[in-house]
């Protein structure tokens, strides 16, 4: 059996929502791309291809007996046919998690909802590199946030975007995070929320799901203390809310969702 056989099989299985694979080369490249062009309209395909460097290509050839071929050619063909490319095993898994999200963004405007200024700056820098914008929120949205947050948190240095929640009291974390998210999602296409709430608590999950499905926009969660919040991460993923250990992983994932939305839109226009 070949990678093409597996992709064809998983493409026909309605119980499979995302196809993720590591390959070192293909002896049936034309078939692979033809399958991808068809299947990618129904479900995401994520591939991490070894042999992107000269040394890697030689290793792949000796390992599998197949030619890795030009990575640039493979990359161009993949993007044309709806394949999302991963650059590492870690990213392969992160993108597979991202595509469990039932919603795709309608544009590239990202909201950054965080509790730390340094994280906001670093996250905004990453967004610029992957084609996402972090536009200032409309004045009306900023005012709505301010009206809600006043008296609940210390004065925020920024409600423009990124949104700095400074510090949320333990007894109001769920309300503050999910209500702020509700307000921000009115003005952006997707949102990254780094939070310190207890992700496994039923009230937090319930409120988050309510906001999530109300707006039908991707939301990626990054726990502020992943070791202490670890048990809640898979609980959110099972509900279609991607959760990541690091902000850069979340931003790359949201970028991939944005790119997939653009690809599907372009195919629909053909």
Image (cartoon, grey):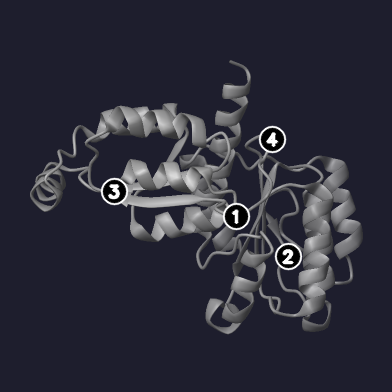
- Judged by depth in the image, the label closer to the viewer, 4 or 1, is 1
Total labels drawn: 4
Residue at 24% x, 35% y: name it: 71
Query: In the rendered image, which residue does mark 1 sit on?
Result: 100
Query: In the rendered image, which residue does mark 4 sit on?
Result: 106
- Asked if disc 2 and disc 3 are in contact, CB closer than 8 Å, the reply is no
Disc 4 and disc 1: Cα gap in Å? 17 Å
Q: Earlier in the sequence, mark 2 or mark 3?
A: 3
Q: Secondary structure at mark 1?
A: loop
Disc 3 and disc 4: Cα gap in Å? 38 Å
In the displayed structure image, the side of residue 168 where residue 228 appears, left or right: left
For label 1, the crowd category at 10 Å Cα-Cα, with few meaning under 14, some 14 to 19 and many 20 or more, is some
Q: Earlier in the sequence, mark 4 or mark 2?
A: 4
Disc 3 and disc 1: Cα gap in Å? 27 Å
Front-most of residues 222 and 147: 222
The disc placed on residue 1 is 3
Query: In the rendered image, which residue does mark 2 sit on?
Result: 165
Q: Earlier in the sequence, mark 3 or mark 4?
A: 3
- Judged by depth in the image, the label closer to the viewer, 3 or 4, is 3
- Judged by depth in the image, the label closer to the viewer, 3 or 1, is 3
Residue at 28% x, 31% y: name it: 29
């Amino acid at each position: 059996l070949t990678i093409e056989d597996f992709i064809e099989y998983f493409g026909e299985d309605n119980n499979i929502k995302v196809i993720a694979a590591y390959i070192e080369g293909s002896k049936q490249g034309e078939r692979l791309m033809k399958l991808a062009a068809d299947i990618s309209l129904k479900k995401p395909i994520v591939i991490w291809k070894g042999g992107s460097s000269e040394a890697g290509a030689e290793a792949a050839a000796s390992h599998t007996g197949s030619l890795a071929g030009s990575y640039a050619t493979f990359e161009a063909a993949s993007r044309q046919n709806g394949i999302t490319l991963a650059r590492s095993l870690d990213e392969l898994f992160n993108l597979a998690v991202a595509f469990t999200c039932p919603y795709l963004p309608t544009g590239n405007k990202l909201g950054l909802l965080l509790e730390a200024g340094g994280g906001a700056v670093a996250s905004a820098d990453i967004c610029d590199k992957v084609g996402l914008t972090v536009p200032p929120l409309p004045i009306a949205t900023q005012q709505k946030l301010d009206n809600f947050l006043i008296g609940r948190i210390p004065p925020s240095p920024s409600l423009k975007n990124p949104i700095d929640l400074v510090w949320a009291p333990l007894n109001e974390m769920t309300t503050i995070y999910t209500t702020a998210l509700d307000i921000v999602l009115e003005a952006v296409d997707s949102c990254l929320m780094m939070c310190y709430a207890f992700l496994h608590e039923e009230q937090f999950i319930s409120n988050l799901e309510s906001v999530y499905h109300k707006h039908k926009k991707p939301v990626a969660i990054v726990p502020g203390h992943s070791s202490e919040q670890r048990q809640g991460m898979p609980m959110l993923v099972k509900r279609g809310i991607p959760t990541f250990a690091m902000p850069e992983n979340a931003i790359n994932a949201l970028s991939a969702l944005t790119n997939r939305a653009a690809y599907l839109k372009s195919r629909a226009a053909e």
